[in-house]
Amino acid sequence: MKTKYNWTRIKSDYNGNPRFVISWLDFGVKSYDAALKLARTIGGKKFHNRQYGGGIVFQSYSLPDTEAAIDRVVGGAA
């Protein structure tokens, strides 16, 4: 599946739902805090892990739908 952003698949959550991490830089804002604030409006959370600094995690069964949501909030912030 071709996606717009560079997603990293991580371990599923406790209930078995798929989770993916994206870099905050893909949000096109000047700070991690600003990207996290935008991501939280669509269900994103801070990714607490040393292997991926500055990551935002999303629970998603459809990455194209998640990317469309990201584009909406990023476009609205510009």
Image (tube, rainbow, N blue to C red):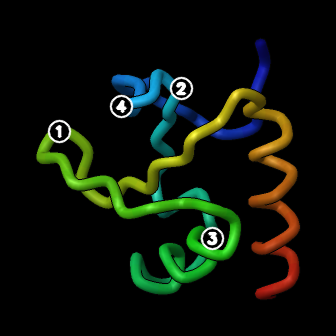
| Quadrant that contains the N terminus | top right
Q: Amino acid at mark 4?
A: Tyr
Residue for badge 3: 28
Residue 14 circle label: 4
Mark 4 vs mark 2, foreground winner is 4
Residue 12: percent from left, percent from top:
41, 25
| Location of residue 29 (image quadrant) | bottom right
> Alpha-carbon neighbours of circle 4 within 10 Å: few (<14), some, or many (≥20)?
few
Q: Are marks 4 and 3 in contact (CB under 8 Å)?
A: no
Element marked by disc 2: loop
Residue of label 1 = 51
CA separation in Å, label 4 and label 3: 31 Å
Distance from the alpha carbon under mark 1 to that under mark 4: 20 Å
Label 2, label 1: how many angstroms apart (C-alpha)?
A: 18 Å
Percent coordinates x, y for residue 17 in the rendering? 53, 27
* Upstream in sequence: badge 1 or badge 4: 4
Screen quadrant of the C terminus = bottom right
The residue that mark 2 highlights is 18
